[in-house]
């Protein structure tokens, strides 16, 4: 009984893998096992982890959003440009965040209203948002004021700001998912849209909401990234959508929707950063990162498939045994 | 014996003057085709009404109208004697447990049960309360299920119980159960019957849809019999014996279509020995050249699974012999090579390529036959001609051979599926529900075709829930029940009532 | 849209018009664009412009053929773009070392074939989900492309390759002829062979195909394999176009490839589409890009137009096909 509910926690696998990896890294370099190093890793993973929290909602509902990299880019560009023009934090923050959320909501609206696959829809918006972003800044790099650095490198009560933000977003996200009606609906819709409609759940509203959430957290991540990097650079966020999706999948969320773990997504993001760290230790060429990431993802997917296959085999055996019993009895 | 007067119900022990639910001349049509016609009955609080009929008789449609999922095309529904324009099942306290479960597999039992009305506030679900609600409901059913378990982890039986428990939460006045015992074990079934008794005592009315005669007589007070969408009988079960009820269901042949069935030869074409899998056990029978063997039984008895296994779609233990020769590796390719073909029961999901033209559907099983040999493997010479030939032979009505199959009527779609297999010149045919959803005219033609095939030297197995069909066509009928062959009838001994009894006996033991 | 409520004779009467519009919804858009750009820019309809456009879109066209096959079976291949890159890199390295162009071609095709085989095995045989699997192999391909090239363009392209990039027959660049050859071959194979028919049927209804005796696993393996090979060829061609093997050459093409195929009218659900439709889709995006370039529209604004067009075009195509049932 206990085993059943324990192994049902989807994040166990990625957590175990992370622990193992930490062990390996410590063996390779004792300096690994320090608090400051852990902090550094968490800070490094904060951007993708924050985005992964939003992506978890989207994938749980059975959808996907590959335009988040462009939303990230656009939000950064908008904020930087606004700061340059108005030098008002309040205005820039609020407008940038509002836009990020709006872009996400637009994705949701298009998915629900036009009923095309989320993949193709967000592929198209990826292009549109990216174009808009570069258009906004005229393809130039824009620095941000130094105070922004606080967001990326400062500390509150001894904890680095990005980690605090990650914690806050995580707690809110976890609460939404597990304690609200909304969270239940998200998972139900991801499991079976048909049943959800038949049961009378507000499918359209929930779908738009999850994409809007994705946009919102991407906005936060964009600001953190801006702060850490020191300004807008071309090529910001390229390829990040795949990292975020990988983190969510590694964390135990099924791409088909309905089942998953927010904890797992965050751990997945950290895991990917750990891999980068490990490769760094090995003095591997920076280009090999993608190869390893891809390999890890493949391994995770294959592993998942094997265990699903084993499970179905087991079920068949059980049914066969029960049938045999019933026949013997009667 | 044929009683159609709703007021016959007034001898109820619980003397309620007003029925909680009534229908008068209820009718439902889909694009011109009437599926349910002129249905009238009363349902009183504290009573259980059995909705009886064969597959396709209209039970599901009626159920859907009564639980608010379908709008009737005609007639009226009355709640407490008052006519209702638009039935809001939720408001009226009517809930249904459908055959196809609508649970969310990745959610817990408690979440599934409460999802329509989650306790607490929208921003703060009261999970302990949801757990309590679920636990209480389940304990009422006396079944041990942990509400924290995911639905997909439960077996089919337990899932059905969860579905019932879920419906009970909403059913304050009327509970509709559609084949609720198909996946239940004997003790679970007993519990269900106890619950139904409790509900009746509390004044809740039940509509019980089932094939199983013992259950109907055990649990229900009144009945309504449907056949081909018409109401052919109603009244109190105490006034009608089981054989009479069964006879009402089956009735006499509509539009006499008995076919002259020729004598089969002695050559054995197909033999299966001790076939077993997770769906059936120890299946053995043989089919001779020119013989038509019918496979009768209820849904879930394992007929489709047996047919699919013979064709090579499923793995089994046991032996399959074609023309006396044992097949060592049973897979689709091998069985096709040995001239076996399988016409699936679900033509939309497993049979037809709905968005492809009729022509491609007709050649799908033997594509290579139509590839021109001259220029190595290029070109489909003769495909159009071959397809057109099949169309005329099978008398398929279609606007154009290039049209998508989805545009054809059910009967013509089925003919396309049949026609496809003709190109492979099979010697052993496995039919699964060959005339499901097919109009009378096409049905007759398909039956004629099947008889011709047998007369031409093929061995035919027909799995069907249409007993009349089997009675008309088969030389022998094998009755399957819960994964086993319960008995066999020779054409000279055909007795529809006995066959139904054998198939529907829910107690273990011989017919 | 489709006059289903009309009686027989009228529906047959209207059928051809609606049928054409349904099957090739992109055609009127292409024609409109061609007309618009030729009016807006004097350079649009010149031989030089057309030649250049044909050459630069050959890579996309070849890769799109592979993507079409995969989409037809109901799957997707996100690795096509980066396999183009890694094939180009490997091919460029070999050619740089050996100065042997045919060998370079074989290497490119082999690299593509390897990735295709891996995809095909994982998806077709082991049943992994296409999206995540090809996303992963795509990452691996991208990484390898940069690892082996160390992030820079490969030097040492044989002179013959460079010449090949400039060759032209009958006003059409040599690389475009290669693309055309592949397109024609693919169209014939898809519509006239057993394998091609099986591809369509598996995509239309996988279960029904299995019931009819078609080996869905083999078909699925083969489309990913072919897509891989074609990506390799596309990578090879890109060297001729650009003069060097560039490690990031394919990366930005994913959107264009998928967009072109879906825009042309091939359904992402499988079982509906054709090579011709993909050609039209590629032509559409090519016309758009070319025209906008000539008008001096900056690339970032082009991205916006591209995205909108892909979205609208896909929506149109799917609406028309839904009207069928």
Image: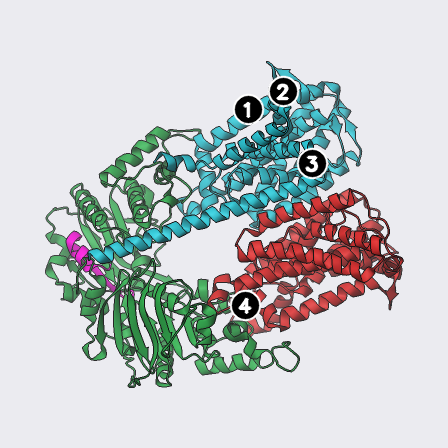
Chain colours: A cyan, B green, C red
Q: Residue tagged by mark 4?
A: B356
Q: Which residue is mark 1?
A: A168
From this viewpoint, which residue is outermost toward the top? A157
Q: Residues within 10 Å of mark 2 (few under 14, many from 20)?
A: few
Q: Chain of mark 3?
A: A
Mark 2 or mark 3, which has the lower sequence index? 2
Tell which subunit mark 1 falls on. A
Is residue C226 within the magenta segment?
no
- Magenta span: B211-230
| Residue A229, image x, y percentages | 72, 27
Work out whether residue B146 can be spotted.
Answer: yes
- Reading the image, the residue beneath label 2 is A36
Check chain identity for marks 4 and 1: say if they share one. Answer: no
Q: Residue at x 57, y 65 (%)?
A: C200
The answer to whether the residue labelled 2 contacts the one labelled 4, judged by CB atoms less than 8 Å apart, is no
Q: Residue at x 43, y 79 (%)?
A: B426
Secondary element under disc 2, as helix, strand or loop, is helix
Q: Give the SS element for disc 1.
A: helix
Q: Quadrant of the C terminus of chain B?
A: bottom left
Discs 2/3, front = 2
| Residue located beneath label 3 in the image | A237
Mark 3, secondary structure of its residue: loop
> Label 4 crowding class (10 Å Cα cut-off): few <14, some 14-19, many 20+?
many
Residue C29 seen in the current view: no
- Along the viewing direction, whichever of B375 and B23 lies nearer the viewer: B375
| Residue C50 x, y percent position in the rendering | 84, 60
Cα–Cα gap, marks 2 and 4? 63 Å
């Amino acid at each position: 009984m206990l085993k059943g509910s324990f192994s049902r926690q989807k994040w166990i696998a990625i957590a175990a893998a992370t622990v193992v990896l930490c062990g390996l890294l410590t063996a390779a370099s004792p300096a690994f096992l320090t608090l400051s190093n852990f902090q550094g890793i968490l800070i490094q993973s904060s951007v993708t982890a924050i985005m992964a929290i939003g992506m978890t909602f989207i994938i749980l509902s059975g959808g996907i959003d590959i335009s988040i990299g462009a939303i990230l880019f656009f939000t950064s560009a908008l904020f930087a440009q606004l700061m340059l023009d108005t030098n008002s934090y309040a205005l820039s923050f609020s407008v940038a965040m509002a836009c990020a959320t709006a872009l996400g909501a637009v994705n949701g609206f298009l998915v629900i209203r036009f009923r095309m696959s989320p993949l193709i829809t967000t592929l198209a918006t990826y292009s549109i948002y990216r174009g808009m972003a570069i258009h906004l800044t005229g393809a130039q790099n824009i620095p941000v004021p130094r105070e922004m650095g606080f967001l990326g490198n400062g500390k509150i009560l001894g904890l680095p700001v990005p980690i605090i933000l990650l914690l806050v977003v995580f707690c809110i996200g976890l609460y939404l998912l597990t304690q609200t009606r909304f969270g239940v609906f998200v998972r139900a819709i991801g499991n079976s849209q048909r049943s959800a409609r038949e049961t009378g759940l507000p499918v359209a509203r929930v779908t738009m909401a999850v994409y809007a959430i994705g946009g919102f957290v991407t906005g936060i991540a964009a600001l953190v990234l801006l702060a850490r990097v020191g300004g807008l650079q071309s090529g910001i966020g390229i390829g990040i959508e795949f990292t975020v999706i990988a983190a969510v999948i590694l964390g135990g969320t099924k791409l088909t929707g309905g089942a998953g773990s927010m904890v797992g997504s965050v751990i997945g993001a950290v895991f990917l950063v750990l891999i980068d760290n490990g490769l760094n230790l090995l003095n591997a060429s920076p280009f090999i990162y993608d190869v390893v990431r891809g390999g890890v993802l493949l391994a995770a997917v294959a592993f998942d498939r094997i265990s699903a296959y084993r499970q179905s085999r087991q079920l068949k055996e059980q049914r066969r045994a029960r049938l045999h019993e019933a026949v013997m009895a009667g | 014996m044929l009683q159609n007067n709703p007021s016959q119900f007034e001898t109820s022990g619980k003397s309620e003057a007003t029925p909680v639910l009534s229908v008068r001349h209820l009718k439902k049509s889909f694009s011109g085709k009437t599926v349910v016609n002129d249905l009238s009955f009363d349902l009183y609080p504290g009573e259980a009404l059995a909705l009886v009929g064969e597959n396709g008789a209209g039970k599901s449609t009626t159920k859907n109208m009564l639980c608010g999922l379908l709008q009737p095309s005609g007639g009226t529904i009355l709640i407490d004697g008052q006519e209702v324009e638009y039935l809001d099942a939720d408001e009226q306290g009517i809930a249904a447990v459908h055959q196809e479960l609508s649970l969310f597999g990745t959610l817990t039992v408690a979440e599934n049960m409460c999802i329509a009305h989650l306790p607490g506030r929208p921003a703060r679900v009261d999970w302990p309360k949801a757990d309590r609600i679920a636990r209480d409901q389940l304990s009422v059913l006396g079944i041990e299920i942990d509400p924290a378990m995911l639905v997909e982890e439960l077996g089919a039986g337990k899932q059905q119980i969860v579905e019932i428990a879920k419906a009970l939460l909403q059913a304050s006045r009327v509970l509709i159960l559609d084949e609720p015992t198909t996946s239940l074990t004997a003790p679970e079934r007993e519990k269900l019957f106890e619950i139904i008794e409790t509900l009746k005592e509390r004044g809740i009315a039940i509509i019980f849809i089932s094939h199983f005669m013992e259950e109907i007589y055990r649990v229900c007070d009144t009945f309504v019999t449907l056949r081909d969408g018409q109401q052919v009988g109603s009244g109190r079960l105490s006034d009608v014996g089981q054989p009479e009820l069964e006879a009402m269901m089956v009735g006499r042949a509509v539009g006499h279509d008995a076919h002259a069935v020729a004598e089969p030869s002695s050559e054995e074409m197909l033999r299966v020995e001790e076939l077993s899998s997770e769906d059936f056990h120890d299946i053995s029978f043989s089919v001779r050249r020119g013989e038509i063997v019918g496979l009768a039984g209820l849904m879930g008895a394992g007929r489709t699974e047996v047919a699919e296994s013979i064709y090579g779609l499923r793995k089994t233990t046991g032996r399959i012999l074609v023309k006396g020769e044992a097949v060592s590796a049973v897979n689709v390719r091998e069985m096709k090579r040995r001239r076996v073909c399988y016409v699936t029961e679900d033509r939309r999901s497993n049979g037809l390529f709905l968005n492809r033209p009729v022509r491609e559907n007709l050649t799908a099983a033997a594509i290579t036959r139509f590839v021109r040999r001259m220029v190595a493997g290029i070109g489909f010479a003769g495909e159009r001609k071959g397809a057109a030939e099949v169309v005329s032979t099978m008398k398929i009505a279609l606007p154009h051979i290039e049209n998508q199959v989805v545009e054809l009527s059910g009967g013509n779609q089925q003919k396309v599926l049949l026609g496809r297999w003709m190109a492979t010149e099979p010697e052993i045919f496995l039919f699964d529900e060959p005339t499901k959803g097919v109009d009378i005219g096409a049905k007759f033609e398909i039956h004629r075709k099947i008889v011709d095939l047998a007369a031409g030297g093929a061995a035919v197995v027909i799995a069907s829930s249409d007993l009349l069909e089997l009675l008309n066509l088969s030389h022998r009928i094998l009755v399957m029940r819960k994964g086993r062959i319960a008995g066999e009838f020779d054409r000279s001994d055909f007795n529809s009532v006995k066959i139904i009894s054998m198939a529907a006996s829910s107690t273990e033991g011989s017919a | 849209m489709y006059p289903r409520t009309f009686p027989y004779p009228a529906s047959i009467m209207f059928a051809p018009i609606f049928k054409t519009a349904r099957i090739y919804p992109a055609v009127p858009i292409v024609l409109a664009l061609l007309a618009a750009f030729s009016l807006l820019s004097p350079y649009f309809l010149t031989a030089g412009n057309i030649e250049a456009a044909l050459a630069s879109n050959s890579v996309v066209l070849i890769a799109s053929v592979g993507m079409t096959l995969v989409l037809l079976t109901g799957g997707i291949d996100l690795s096509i773009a980066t396999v183009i890159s890694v094939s180009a890199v490997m091919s460029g390295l070999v050619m740089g070392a050996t100065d042997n162009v045919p060998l370079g071609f074989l290497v490119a095709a082999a690299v593509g074939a390897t990735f295709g085989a891996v995809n095909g095995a994982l998806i077709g045989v082991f049943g992994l989900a296409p999206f995540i699997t090809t996303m992963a192999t795509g990452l691996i391909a991208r990484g390898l492309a940069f690892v082996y090239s160390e992030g820079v363009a490969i030097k040492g392209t044989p002179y013959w390759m460079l010449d090949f990039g400039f060759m032209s027959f009958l006003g059409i660049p040599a690389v475009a002829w290669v693309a055309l050859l592949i397109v024609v071959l693919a169209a014939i194979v898809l519509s006239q062979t057993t394998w091609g028919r099986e591809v369509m049927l598996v995509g239309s209804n996988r279960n029904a195909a299995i019931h009819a005796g078609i080996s869905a696993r083999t078909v699925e393996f083969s489309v990913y394999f072919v897509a891989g090979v074609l990506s390799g060829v596309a990578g090879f061609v890109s060297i001729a176009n650009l003069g060097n093997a560039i490690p990031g050459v394919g990366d930005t093409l994913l959107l264009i490839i998928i967009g072109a195929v879906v825009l042309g009218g091939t359904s992402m659900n499988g079982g509906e589409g054709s090579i011709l439709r993909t050609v039209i889709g590629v032509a559409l995006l090519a016309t758009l890009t070319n025209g906008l370039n000539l008008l001096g529209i900056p690339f970032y604004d082009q991205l916006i137009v591209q995205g909108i067009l892909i979205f609208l075009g896909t929506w149109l195509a799917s609406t028309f096909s839904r009207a069928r049932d």
